[in-house]
């Protein structure tokens, strides 16, 4: 197992900030390349201009033409939280703007595949739309768009994924990641693209003195933009931070869709105090569970309804799906960890430069999460596979779990669907590309980016694929680059306060590409106990100040368990205590405000113990 080390972020010279900015924030921002008030300001007026995103003019014309016809418009979204928020956003805006018949369709991807496939177009055509709008997908759906054209349905593609060499023959395309785009951010999520489209449409209609549009404020949907942007893990560049900050503000003031409040309440989070991480860790998984296990309609309905009671019951159903997802994932993760240990032993203690994990019973909606968790433990690329065919029948059966269905004895080969998660330095899509070049018939289909990819493979090809993947990954993999925890340095005794914790909490939004501040320092471990079976609670004394603080290391025993085969237990905690009794440990930690029975106390969230 790779040891983890703490490395301090290189801090650029502190920038040109207003004097009242907290000194810790000043350092933290500088280390993230934010050096002046200009790149710090999160006012909506600093958003990249709507007019600077290419394709919006044609798209707006197209929408207005279909509005005039009064025929049905169908929004076809991707099956994850970005897709669900995009779908809800566009349907809500179109209805507000007087489009008489706007609906959505979200494919069950197990049945209909990814993107706008010809099968989905056939399904959509039953509703006789005159226009299909894809959100968060469609840029590589040449066949689906051609099929729609053949049926006399126009297509407006909005997407943020990287296009292939050929674009679909759509009536209009909006995508900041088209090669010739000069838009100032490539990090816009699918829901960000949808927002820009609706902003352009609203403005256009207002310019035409449309009485309906006069009452519409497109900023009202920023709650959905914030949720989809955080959930999709796109880089929180300046433009995305503005979008997320304003969405959060609206949610805190409860000026948001009832579905988001209901999902937060399901997760026992107070909407008035949420930060970006709450959207990522509490709301997004509940929405995604629907897309992973069933189909996303229920998630979109939850974001579409204006009725609080309906929102609450849909949110409860999503939470239940999320529980099921968690149980399935837990079981798969344990099996995967066992498989990793076995590989570990078989290979004499050294892990290969990449790992392939497969079990016939695994659910293909959850393999990505398993790959991601195992990757975090072993610090090398991981591909987790499930059978593709069985999962077609893999629907929720009356809440008791997943009915995997029985495979009909047939002659067609068993297909596996794999989900890959990578580590810094290994561009997993390029690795798959190299494998596919060397063995042209090995991989059926693959796609993705540097850190994550998906692929389809015949079961009989798995052994050869594993060998080829390990060989190719070895060219990229550098053990020395793995398991590094980045820190913003030490906090002085006068900085380690509740006030600083509040400043940091309000200094966000933090997230992908704009990491939440973390620090490191020496602490004496005074006391430890296990909470919730896998978390480690500590009382520590800061060596510099002598102050005694509460600290918690979430999932500590899960990580430790994967490393040395020990499960979380009281014995493990006392072993830990012995190891550190009266000794000091170097901790990487974040500052947190712990609210308990109305009292607020400083707490350290421990990310790593050296
Ligand atoms: Mn997306």
Image (cartoon, helix red, strand yellow):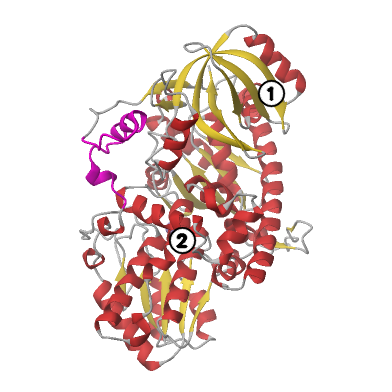
Q: Is residue 313 left or right of residue 214?
A: right
Q: Nearer the viewer, residue 255 or 573?
A: 255
Mark 1 = which residue?
A: 565
Residue 190 located left or right of residue 547: left
The residue depicted at 35 percent of the width and 81 percent of the height is 213
Q: What x and y, as percent, mark residue 219?
A: 38, 66
Placement of 415 over or under 256, stated as above or below:
above
Quadrant in which the N terminus is drawn:
top right
Question: Residue 269, can we see it?
Answer: yes
Mark pair 2, 1: CA separation: 43 Å
Ranked by sequence position, the earlier of labels 2 and 1 is 2
- Which residue is under mark 2? 223
Membership of 567 in magenta stretch: no
Q: Which residues are magenta?
A: 16-42
Q: Give yes or no for residue 30 being in the magenta stretch.
A: yes
Q: Does residue 484 lie above or below 194 as drawn?
A: above
Mark 2 vs mark 1: in front: 2
Quarter of the image for residue 150 reads bottom left
Q: Position of residue 162 (x, y in %)?
A: 34, 57
Left of 253 or right of it: where is 288?
right
Secondary element type, mark 2: helix
Q: Nearer the viewer, residue 385 or 246?
A: 246
């Amino acid at each position: 197992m790779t040891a983890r080390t703490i490395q301090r972020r290189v801090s650029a010279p502190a920038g040109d900030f207003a004097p009242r900015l907290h000194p810790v924030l000043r350092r933290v921002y500088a280390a993230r390349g934010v050096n002046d008030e200009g790149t710090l300001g999160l006012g909506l007026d600093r958003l990249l201009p709507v007019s600077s995103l290419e394709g919006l003019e044609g798209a707006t014309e197209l929408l207005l033409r279909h509005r005039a016809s009064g025929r049905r418009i169908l929004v076809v979204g991707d099956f994850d939280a970005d897709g669900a928020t995009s779908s809800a956003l566009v349907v809500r805006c179109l209805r507000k703007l007087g489009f008489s018949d706007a609906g959505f369709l979200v494919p069950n991807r197990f049945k209909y595949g990814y993107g706008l496939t010809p099968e989905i177009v056939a399904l959509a055509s039953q509703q006789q739309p005159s226009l299909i709008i894809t959100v968060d997908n469609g840029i590589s759906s040449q066949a689906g768009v051609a099929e729609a054209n053949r049926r006399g349905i126009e297509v407006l593609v909005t997407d943020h994924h990287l296009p292939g060499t050929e674009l679909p023959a759509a009536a209009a395309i909006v995508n900041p990641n088209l090669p010739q785009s000069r838009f100032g951010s490539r990090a816009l999520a699918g829901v960000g693209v949808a927002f820009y489209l609706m902003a352009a449409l609203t403005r256009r209609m207002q310019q035409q003195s449309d009485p309906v549009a006069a009452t519409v404020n497109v900023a009202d949907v920023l709650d959905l933009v914030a949720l989809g942007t955080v959930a999709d893990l796109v880089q929180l560049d300046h433009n995305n931070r503005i979008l997320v900050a304003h969405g959060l503000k609206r949610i805190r003031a409860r000026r948001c869709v009832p579905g988001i409040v209901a999902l937060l309440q399901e997760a026992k989070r107070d909407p008035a105090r949420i930060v970006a991480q709450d959207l990522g860790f509490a709301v997004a998984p509940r929405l995604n569970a629907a897309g992973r296990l069933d189909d996303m309609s229920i998630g979109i309905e939850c974001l579409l309804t204006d009725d609080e009671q309906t929102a609450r019951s849909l949110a409860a159903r999503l939470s239940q799906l999320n529980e099921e997802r968690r149980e399935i994932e837990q079981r798969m993760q344990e099996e995967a960890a066992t498989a990793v240990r076995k590989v570990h032993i078989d290979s004499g203690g050294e892990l290969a430069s990449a790992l392939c994990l497969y079990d016939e019973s695994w659910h293909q909606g959850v393999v990505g999460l398993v790959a991601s968790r195992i990757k975090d433990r072993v610090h090398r690329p991981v591909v987790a596979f499930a059978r593709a065919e069985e999962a077609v029948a893999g629907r929720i059966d009356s809440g008791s779990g997943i009915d995997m269905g029985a495979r009909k004895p047939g002659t067609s080969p068993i297909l596996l669907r794999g989900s890959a998660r990578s580590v810094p330095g290994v561009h997993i899509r390029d690795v798959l590309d190299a494998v596919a070049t060397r063995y042209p018939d090995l991989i059926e289909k693959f796609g993705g980016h540097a850190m994550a990819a998906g692929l389809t493979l015949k079961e009989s090809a798995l052994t050869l694929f594993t060998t080829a993947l390990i060989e190719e990954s070895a060219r990229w993999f550098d053990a020395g680059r793995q398991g590094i925890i980045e820190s913003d340095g030490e906090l002085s005794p006068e900085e380690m306060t509740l006030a600083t914790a509040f400043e940091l909490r309000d200094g966000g939004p933090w997230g992908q590409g704009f990491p939440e501040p973390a620090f490191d320092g020496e602490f004496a471990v005074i006391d430890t106990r296990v909470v919730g079976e896998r978390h480690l609670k500590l009382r520590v004394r800061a060596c510099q100040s002598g102050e005694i603080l509460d600290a918690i290391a979430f999932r500590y025993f899960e990580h430790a368990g994967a490393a040395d085969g020990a499960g979380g237990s009281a014995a493990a905690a006392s072993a830990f205590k012995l190891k550190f009794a009266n000794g000091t440990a170097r901790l990487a930690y974040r500052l947190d405000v712990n609210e308990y029975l109305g009292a607020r106390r400083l707490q350290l969230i421990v990310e790593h113990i050296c």
